[in-house]
Amino acid sequence: MAEIRVDNLVKRFGGFTAVRDTSFTVADGDFFCLLGPSGCGKTTTLRMVAGLELPSSGSIRLDGEDVTFKRARERDIAMVFQLFALYPHMNVRKNIAFPLVSMGVPKDETRRRVEGAARTLRIEHMLDKPVSGLSGGDRQRVALGRAIVREPKAFMMDEPLGALDAEFRHLMCGELRALHDRLKATTVYVTHDQLEAMSMADVIAVMNEGVIEQLGSPQEIYDRPNSMFVGDFIGSPSMNFVRFDGATTTGATAVTIDGTAVALPALRETRGAGPLALGVRPEQIVIGEPGATSAALPAEIFGAEYLGTNQIVTLTTPRGTLKARLPAHLGARAGDRVSLSFKPERLSLFDAATGKAIRSALHEAAATGRNHG
């Protein structure tokens, strides 16, 4: 397998720029996810890495070789798409073997690779079955097998689970990650589903309007979003934003909202006196009785969604609607008045005008070094 390095990649379609000055490195053996909403440029980026689209500018290196303007057939990669694109007149064995037959691989070697891929995917019992009678999950396994047998330097996967129902997607997420670990493959995976990315990826690149907003591990992106867009896009429910005037801040490790001092992590600092937004994950909200603590905001419970082990409680406050994730056994009745406080360890602070996170110089330097490494 191989490292993939992308530098300053740009793709224009006429007057529209789909991908803007994008740079990232996929380490050898990493599972790398391009994540973002429809139209953000993630599939276009993948297609350029795969050679299905040629960039307007920038460079792409695969295993140290410059492949920027080489066509897909000249790059040692394998693709898996959302649509299975299997040959309906062939059985499973012939579908998996097709790329090897096209390459002129000897029959004995072809048989060995096909049967090896089938064992890896646990479909050896259906090799002689027609693909027309298979379930969606099994068809996707066949499509994966067709990619695996080529033994490429890297795999490119464009929303391969998008056509499956929720139960199959959940099952296939686990199987794809396990397959990746067994093959030790370099994989670039495109998805708009944050749960897929968070559950499978070693590194996630969150894209928005052709730009990578943040590059990092799933935990880092969840805990320390670089922008309000990332905080809103990652998480279910998404991050809450409490907007306030930055002129009322009380220092580098606390802010004041409606007369209440809210502590911040040590690696954050306030800058300027413009509008700010405090980012609060639902699990960081603590609910108490009215007036239970001086460092609390007043709120009223609007409703609750019970999810078995926990509940999502919707709260109305003078600063807008917030959602809290609470244990299911805590009573939460619509109309109850409560007080809110926030766990300070993972709060985020944003410039409300630009949407960018406000960080200490130490954290900024560490993030910059990681994103360009």
Image (cartoon, rainbow, N blue to C red):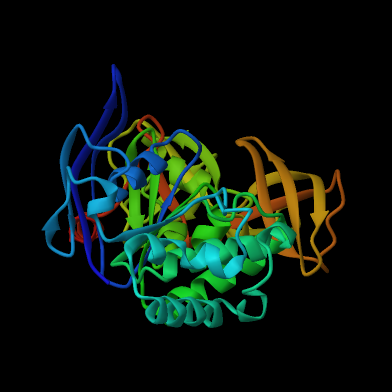
Percent position of residue 84, x then y: 57, 53
Q: Is residue 94 left or right of residue 373?
A: right
Q: Where does the N terminus fall, quadrant-wise? A: bottom left
| Viewer-side residue, 364 vs 135 | 135
Q: Residue at x 58, y 66 (%)?
A: 141
Q: Decide: is 362 above or below 276.
A: below
Q: Decide: is 162 above or below 136.
A: above
| Viewer-side residue, 366 vs 316 | 366
Q: Residue at x 73, y 46 (%)?
A: 314
Q: Is residue 357 visible?
A: no
Q: Where does the C terminus fall, quadrant-wise? A: bottom left
> Across the whole image, how many numbered discs are drawn on residues?
0
Q: Which residue in the rendered view is the most extreme toward the top?
A: 15
Q: Is residue 146 left or right of residue 90?
A: left
| Viewer-side residue, 356 vs 140 | 140
Q: Please identify the quarter of the rendering in which residue 125 is found.
A: bottom right
Percent position of residue 66, x then y: 12, 53
Q: Residue at x 41, y 34 (%)?
A: 352
Q: Decide: is 285 above or below 174.
A: above
Q: Is residue 141 left or right of residue 218?
A: right
Percent position of residue 278, x then y: 47, 45
Percent position of residue 372, x then y: 18, 56
Q: Is residue 46 left or right of residue 218?
A: left
| Viewer-side residue, 112 vs 255 | 112
Q: Decide: is 120 above or below 330.
A: below
Q: Is residue 80 visible?
A: yes
